[in-house]
Image: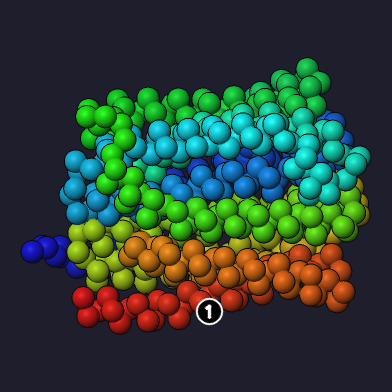
Amino acid sequence: MTTQRKPERLSQLAALLVKFSLPLILSGILQQLYNWADAFIVGNVVGELALAAVGSTTSMVNFYVLAITGFTLGLSILFAQKYGSRQLEDLPRLLSTFLWVLGLAFLVLAGLGMCFTRQLLQLLHTNADVLSQAEDYLRIVLAGVPFLAVYNVYSAALRGIGNSRAPFYAVLLSSLVNVALDIVFVAFLGWGVAGAAFATILSQIAMTVFLAAYTVRSYPLLRFARRGSLHREMLRQGLRFGIPPMLQSSVSSVGSLILQNFMNGFGTQTVAAITTAYRVDSIVMVPILNLSSGISTLAAQSCGAGETRRARRIFQAGLGIMAGVALLLTVLVIPTGGDLIALFGAGAEAVSIGDSFFRRIALFYLIFGLANAVRGYLEGMGDVVYSSFAGMASLVCRIILSYALAGIFANMVIAWAEALSWVLLLLLYVLRALWKGRQWNRA
């Protein structure tokens, strides 16, 4: 029989959510600054072609990164549910199992990517004038992928037990290392895009070593399980939670590759403008995405403890915060989008294209924010399969609209197609939440 804690006011739950989510948001911003630093320094020191070269690798790098973060998002929910239900003996087993599984899996996948870098870039129809530099950058960056996998497993475990601060400190260290090495390798040593790539992977190694050492020292319950490192039951449970969001992220990455190929057809100026705009947009989205992660983690802990009413109230608090954050981002981004693009050394035409992109996409930030609030609640309650399905359906909608509406909106179809796909995403999540809510209320 589960003991219900004294009901907390919405204001208390909102404060708890903000306290937990703020380090996640700061971590996400700093992680995006890896790419910002690379693009900013490369664009201003080496030139616009180098900027386009780094931008041309974004979809391929994201294929790996999103697969890792997607899987470990599911793991974080499982860690949180087990922590909430006090199944503490399972935590080290789950951690050790997926350190091995994900570490080795992405070592192999990164190796394959490094072997076929040029072929992958040619498959994306990467423009010939940036192909050589893009190949150099991508091959080096892929070497850091296994370290990202290990980092994200540790980060998922810590978030699951309620510690969102340590991953932030790790990312802060990594960001400082990355910026310092970017300046040394690119600005002083003149290594170009290769120097930016080396700075990125060395900073990722530093981040991973720091977080692993912190976890082993500070949390005995998160040390390796003594009886072996692979546990069949933990593998089964972890795959059940991790595979759906990983598939969604992987499909999203493949979709991004298709859209990258589509975007390349508009020419180098559009590629430089939109890829740089997405670098800015990726930071703008961080508060929304990580607030969603905060909702899912706290809801999962409550779900694991059998406190479904508390989970629902966490969602209600999160929904209000999310709406305010999304509206604030809209107000901030619309008048400044072009100026942010210019910071990366883009030319006047690219800045104009980027400014037009933001004036369209930012109008839909509220839709995207509300969709992610509902998504976080559904995933925290364990409904990860449907959440992943909805994300994939939204992506398919975005791809179809991109090709179908290109004749009407030209290169701005990239913004309109994504915005309309967010509308579909919100609709799918709301319908699911209403239907599942009746079941959870009866439970």
Residue at image location 73% in from the left, 57% down from the top: 258
Residue at image location 44% in from the left, 26% down from the top: 210
Q: Name the residue under label 1.
A: 427
Q: How far across and down, in percent of the image, does residue 443 sit?
A: 21, 76
Q: How far across and down, in percent of the image, does residue 65 sit?
A: 57, 44
Q: Going by the image, does 354 lie left or right of 146? A: right
Q: Is residue 357 visible?
A: yes
* Quarter containing the N terminus: bottom left
Task: Name, please, the residue furthest toward the left.
Answer: 1
* Front in this rendered view, residue 230 or 412: 230
Q: Which of the 4 image quarters holds residue 297?
A: bottom left
Q: Can residue 290 be seen in this view?
A: no
Q: Is residue 387 above or below residue 179?
A: below
Residue type at tag 1: Leu
Q: How far across and down, in percent of the image, does residue 51 sit?
A: 81, 40
Label 1 element class: helix
Q: Going by the image, does 160 lie left or right of 139? A: left
Q: Is residue 319 above or below residue 171?
A: below
Q: Going by the image, does 441 lie left or right of 251? A: left
Q: Going by the image, does 64 lie left or right of 207? A: right
Q: How far across and down, in percent of the image, does residue 148 sit?
A: 52, 35
Q: Which of the 4 image quarters holds residue 277?
A: bottom right
Crowding around mark 1 (Cα neighbors within 10 Å: few <14, some 14 to 19, many 20+) is: some
* Front in this rendered view, residue 78 or 106: 106
Query: How many numbered callouts?
Result: 1
* Front in this rendered view, residue 45 or 67: 67
Residue at image location 74% in from the left, 32% down from the top: 137
Residue at image location 23% in from the left, 43% down from the top: 90
Tell me, what colour scheme is on the image? rainbow
